[in-house]
Structure formats: structure tokens, C-alpha cells
């Protein structure tokens, strides 16, 4: 037996526990190659399925409980920190919160299959106040489904490989190389996907100072102000419910459905709370494909605007205000002092 494979077999359950733990704590190293490898080895009875599952469940219970209690204690700050280290630009805080809004604890049953959501789901469950016993039950159920699906997929591959003794011996000889190539392949795919997305966002995004200049230009010239959309989830309003001047709150899942109501004759600015503007950038790219070309994500989102010291207002839906009186530039720029 090759040295690398012998080492893996000897310490397999500890490796499974540690590897999955590191990934679930937020370090972007893929666990799927380890699960597939362990599953393949169960076909030769060098490893056993139930101890492998228990090792993964113990790891997930520890790491997910850790993030659950941090989310319950610190809320959105923990979520943004985790999202910053995620390779998956499309899976950020707002998208994850949307899953919980629509499906509740059932989200935990499939969260492990979605890169990024896997780690962020636990602190959001804590932030929403889900009882810990309920969280742990659904989380362990989802972890078991996730672990078994890849362990059994590896077991199936191992059973097929055993039918050809020559192929199985070749696979055993180069098992270490195959494992390393799988890990590198998963990492490369995530990195390339992230870089392509961020390149598209960087070409579109608007600096806070540029948006402030658009407000000033609108007020001085009497032209319509930029159409600003607040994409934050209701959970993100809790620490600070204020919005940018004239901003309209629309959930990310509702933007495309309301595309016909978005004006085409002025600048549209989207902002969220995600690092690197993941949510607003993704929606900006989607709206570009729908023919709305003057849409741009705000660099730094809500936090970037707030840190720059620009005005923030108590939220008033412009559509409701129009029923009573026109919303003038001076009304929209009525400044609520930033602390």
C-alpha cells in the first residue's frame, strides 16, 4: 500500500473530522474530495461507513454550534466577516437570509450543498433566534444527508473499480496524486469563478463620492435624482434602519420581477451589506442583461457610505410619500446625523 494511502487509512476518521471542521469554520478548502476518498475506501473495508459519518457529524456539530452562538451574540458583523472569506461571490449574506425567509429551518437540510451558504447558515440561524435544539436537529439532519451522499458516491465508485483488479491497483498506487488533483481542481474552479464575477462588478461599481456628486448635481440642476435601491435583508436593518437619501427598499429576489418599474432615463444605484458588493453586483449584471444599462453597484455598500460620513435618512417609501406630497430634493437630502 502506498505510504500516503496507508497514512490516510490509519488516521482516516481523525482526518475526516479535522478537514471538515476547518472547512466549516470558514477556511475555503473543499471537503468533497476527502469524503469521496473515504467512501471509496469503504468498498475495500479499510474504512467503515458509520464511523466515517459520525466523524463528519461531530465535526459539523462543533463548528456549526460555534457559528450559531457567535451569530446569536454578534449578528450581522459575523456574517459579513464570513462572507468576506468566501470564494463564492454569489452566496453572500443577503442571499442566505433570503433562504431562511422563504424556507426557515429547512434551509439547514440542504445548506451544506451550497458553497458559502454552508458556513453562513449557522450564524444566521442564531441571529434569527432559532432555538438551539431545533437548530441542532435540522443541522445534524442536513449534515448527515450531505456526508452520506458523497460517502456513498465514493463507495459506488470503489465497488465499480473493484471489478477491474488492474484498474483498482493503479488507483490505489496513485490515490494520493488523485486526491491532490481533486482538491486543486475544486479550488481552481472556485477561484476562477470568483475572479470572473469580481471583474464584472469592478467594471460597473460606483464610488460613494461619485454618488454624492450625482445627488448634488441633481439638486442644483433640478433633474431627477439617481434611483437608489436598498437591497439589504430586514435582518440587516436591525443594527441601523436608516437608508441612503431617497433609497427604495427592495429584496434582491424581487428586483428582477420589478424590472419594468425601474426607470431607464437616470442612474440606478444598488447597495447591500456584502463585501465586494456581491449581491448588488450580481443584480446589476442581471439588469444589464434585461436592457437596464445605467445600473451600478455602490462600492462598499451601506457600510462604505456610512463610513464616509455621507447623509443617512429615516426610511420613507417614496411611493407612499408621492401620494401625499412630492418628494423634493431638499426633502430627500434632509440629513440625519451619522453617529
Image: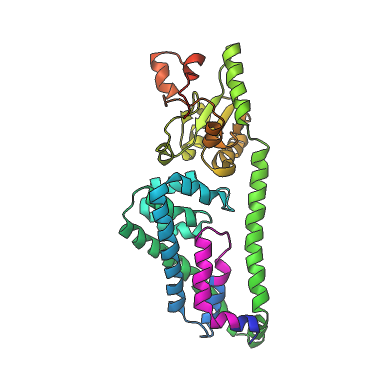
Residue 319 against residue 198 in the figure, above or below: above
Rendering quarter of residue 215: top right
What colour scheme governs how the chains and residues are painted in the rendered image of this protein?
A: rainbow
Q: Position of residue 81 (x, y in %)?
A: 52, 49
Q: Is residue 13 magenta?
A: yes
Residue segment shown in magenta: 7-34
Which residue corresponds to the image point at 47% horizontal and 49% vertical from the top-left? 78
Task: State whether residue 226 appears in this view.
Answer: yes
Which residue corresponds to the image point at 56% horizontal and 17% vertical from the top-left? 224
Residue 128 against residue 262 in the figure, above or below: below
Q: Position of residue 116 (x, y in %)?
A: 52, 54
Residue sitting nearer the eye, 127 or 103: 127
Q: State left or right for residue 169 relative to residue 128.
A: right
From the image, give the main secondary structure of the stretch colored magenta.
helix
Residue sitting nearer the eye, 141 or 219: 219
**Image quadrant in which the N terminus is located:** bottom right
Residue 52 against residue 124 in the figure, above or below: below
Task: State whether residue 265 appears in this view.
Answer: no
Total marks in image: 0
Q: Position of residue 143 (x, y in %)?
A: 43, 65
Q: Position of residue 16 (x, y in %)?
A: 51, 72
Residue 92 against residue 308 in the figure, above or below: below
Rendering quarter of residue 64: bottom left
Q: Is residue 39 magenta?
A: no
Q: State left or right for residue 4 relative to residue 46.
A: right
Rendering quarter of residue 218: top right
Amino acid at each position: 500500500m502506498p505510504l500516503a494511502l496507508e497514512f490516510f487509512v490509519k488516521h482516516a476518521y481523525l482526518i475526516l473530522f479535522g478537514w471538515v471542521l476547518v472547512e466549516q469554520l470558514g477556511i475555503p478548502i473543499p471537503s468533497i474530495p476527502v469524503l469521496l476518498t473515504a467512501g471509496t475506501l469503504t468498498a475495500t473495508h479499510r474504512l467503515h461507513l458509520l464511523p466515517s459519518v459520525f466523524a463528519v457529524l461531530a465535526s459539523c456539530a462543533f463548528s456549526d454550534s460555534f457559528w450559531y452562538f457567535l451569530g446569536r451574540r454578534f449578528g450581522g458583523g459575523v456574517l459579513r466577516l464570513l462572507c468576506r472569506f468566501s470564494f463564492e461571490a454569489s452566496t453572500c449574506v443577503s442571499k442566505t437570509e433570503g433562504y431562511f425567509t422563504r424556507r426557515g429551518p429547512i434551509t439547514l437540510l440542504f445548506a451544506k450543498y451550497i458553497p458559502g451558504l454552508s458556513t453562513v447558515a449557522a450564524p444566521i440561524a442564531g441571529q434569527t433566534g432559532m432555538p438551539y435544539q431545533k437548530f441542532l436537529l435540522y443541522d445534524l439532519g442536513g449534515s448527515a444527508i450531505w456526508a452520506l451522499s458523497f460517502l456513498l458516491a465514493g463507495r459506488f465508485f470503489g465497488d465499480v473499480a473493484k471489478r477491474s483488479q488492474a484498474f483498482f491497483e493503479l488507483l490505489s498506487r496513485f490515490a494520493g496524486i488523485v486526491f491532490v488533483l481533486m482538491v486543486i481542481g475544486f479550488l481552481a474552479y472556485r477561484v476562477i469563478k470568483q475572479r470572473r464575477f469580481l471583474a464584472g462588478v469592478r467594471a460597473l461599481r460606483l464610488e460613494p463620492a461619485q454618488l454624492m456628486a450625482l445627488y448634488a448635481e441633481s439638486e442644483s440642476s433640478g433633474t431627477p435624482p439617481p434611483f437608489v435601491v436598498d437591497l439589504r435583508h430586514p435582518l440587516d436593518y436591525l443594527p441601523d434602519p436608516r437608508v441612503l437619501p431617497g433609497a427604495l427598499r427592495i429584496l434582491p429576489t424581487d428586483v428582477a420581477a420589478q424590472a419594468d418599474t425601474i426607470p431607464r432615463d437616470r442612474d440606478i444605484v444598488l447597495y447591500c451589506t456584502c463585501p465586494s458588493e456581491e449581491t448588488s453586483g450580481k443584480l446589476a449584471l442581471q439588469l444589464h442583461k434585461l436592457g437596464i444599462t445605467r445600473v451600478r453597484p455602490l462600492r462598499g455598500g451601506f457600510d462604505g457610505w456610512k463610513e464616509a460620513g455621507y447623509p443617512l435618512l429615516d426610511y420613507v417609501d417614496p411611493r407612499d410619500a408621492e401620494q401625499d406630497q412630492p418628494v423634493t430634493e431638499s426633502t430627500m437630502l434632509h440629513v440625519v446625523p451619522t453617529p
